[in-house]
Image: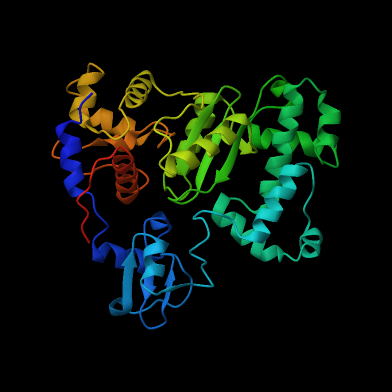
């Protein structure tokens, strides 16, 4: 399939965000720009992430770069506070230790005393997990234990030993916590596999990956405002909420995303478990047919699914896609080549299109 007129127009319009947009992102410490650019400070000679918590430099003292390599070549040193050379979306060392501890032993109860023995301040852990996962560390650990319990119930283990094996001190406490999270009793959940979810890093910031026993069912930007609604959709369409954990499909998409962002992968092989309305599923499956390095317009997409007058509905279905990047809704642009309507932010859409066009050997006209 040849590159259409929308793709040709896109190659002339993709560029680094405008200076005013860059300054606004730094002023607001906007996490959606993580991985898009770094900012050099002329007065100190260092370069930082857009979200660096240090005192912000005056606008006239800022210099913007697309990559850390460009900043280093220009003579700037990496900031010791925000550590821009570390992978965007990665957890700090102490948080990685906590998450790895819970992955290795999901039934462990991490009390404040246990955290202090790990040289971690409970208040710091509480704030960090609340900001990153939308729940405190204790709530995260409890959800992890309940996910383990759901796994055991799926295997056919009786309810009472499952509760105690999952780290709960009483049978009634386990049953109450289980019903509060999943909306059903442990007995009713026997034979039901869990949806597991894991935060993973990417050059565009952290992604929340979720998978069922059949395949990947969500891969959302973790700072997206609509993320809670997408999680609610999971509960509605799959009759169970996601819990912290991982499985073979999440680990597979992590490997494939690494290859994709390195420019070495053009399509994804990870199995998908797609569920939505009949119309949404038609749109999402058609998105999977758009070749790497190419784009189509909303009008063309509507025609392809046999609904030529449903361009607005197609745009809404694009916005409800829970597996962006893998289901490439970023490849749909306006007929005139302009970018529009990406839930993760237009600059992420720009980044993905540029990455694919470069990997496909299409030369871009980049501007400052």
Q: Say whether residue 328 is left or right of residue 169.
A: left
Q: Is residue 29 above or below residue 343?
A: below
Q: Is residue 60 above or below residue 366?
A: below
Q: Is residue 219 above or below residue 137?
A: above
Q: Quadrant of the N terminus?
A: top left
Q: Quadrant of residue 157?
A: top right
What residue is drawn where x is 46% and y is 41%? Answer: 220
Counting from the top left corner in percent of width and height, residue 58 is at: 33, 79
| 11 or 279: nearer the viewer | 11
Q: Is residue 304 above or below residue 36?
A: above
Counting from the top left corner in percent of width and height, residue 49 is at: 44, 65
| 250 or 189: nearer the viewer | 250
Q: Quadrant of residue 129?
A: bottom right
Mark yes or no: residue 342 visible: no
What residue is drawn where x is 75% and y is 25%? Answer: 153
Counting from the top left corner in percent of width and height, residue 197 is at: 59, 38
Q: Quadrant of the C terminus?
A: bottom left
| 95 or 361: nearer the viewer | 361
């Amino acid at each position: 399939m040849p590159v259409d007129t929308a793709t040709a127009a896109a190659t002339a319009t993709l560029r680094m965000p405008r200076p005013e947009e860059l300054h606004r992102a730094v002023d607001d410490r906007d996490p959606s720009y993580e991985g898009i650019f770094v900012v050099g400070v002329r007065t100190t000679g260092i370069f930082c992430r857009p979200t660096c918590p240090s005192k912000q430099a005056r606008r006239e003292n800022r210099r913007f770069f697309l990559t850390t390599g460009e900043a280093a070549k220009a003579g700037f040193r990496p900031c010791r506070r925000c550590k821009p050379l570390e992978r965007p979306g990665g957890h700090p060392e102490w948080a990685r230790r906590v998450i790895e501890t819970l992955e290795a032993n999901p039934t462990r109860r991490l009390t404040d005393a246990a955290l202090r023995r790990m040289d971690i301040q409970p208040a710091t852990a509480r704030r960090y997990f609340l900001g990153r996962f939308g729940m405190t560390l204790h709530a995260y650990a409890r959800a992890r234990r309940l996910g383990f319990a759901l796994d055991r119930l799926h295997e056919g283990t009786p309810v009472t030993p499952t509760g105690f094996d999952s780290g709960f001190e009483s049978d009634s406490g386990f049953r109450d916590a289980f019903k509060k999270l999943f909306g059903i009793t442990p007995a009713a959940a026997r034979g039901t596999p869990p949806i597991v979810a894991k935060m993973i890093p990417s050059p565009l910031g952290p992604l929340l990956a979720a998978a069922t026993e059949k395949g990947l069912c969500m891969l959302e930007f973790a700072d997206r405002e609509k993320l809670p609604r997408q999680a609610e959709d999971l509960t509605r369409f799959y009759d169970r909420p996601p819990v912290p954990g991982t499985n073979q499909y999440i680990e597979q998409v992590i490997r494939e995303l690494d290859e994709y962002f390195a420019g070495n992968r053009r399509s994804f092989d990870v199995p998908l478990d797609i569920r939505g309305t009949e119309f949404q599923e038609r749109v999402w499956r058609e998105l999977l047919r758009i070749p790497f390095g190419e784009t189509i317009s909303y009008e063309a997409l509507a025609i392809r699914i046999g609904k030529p007058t449903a361009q607005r509905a197609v745009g809404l279905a694009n916005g409800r896609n829970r597996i962006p990047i893998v289901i490439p809704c970023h490849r749909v642009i306006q007929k005139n080549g302009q970018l529009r309507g990406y839930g993760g932010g237009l600059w992420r859409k720009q980044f993905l299109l540029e990455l694919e066009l470069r990997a496909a050997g299409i030369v871009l006209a980049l501007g400052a």
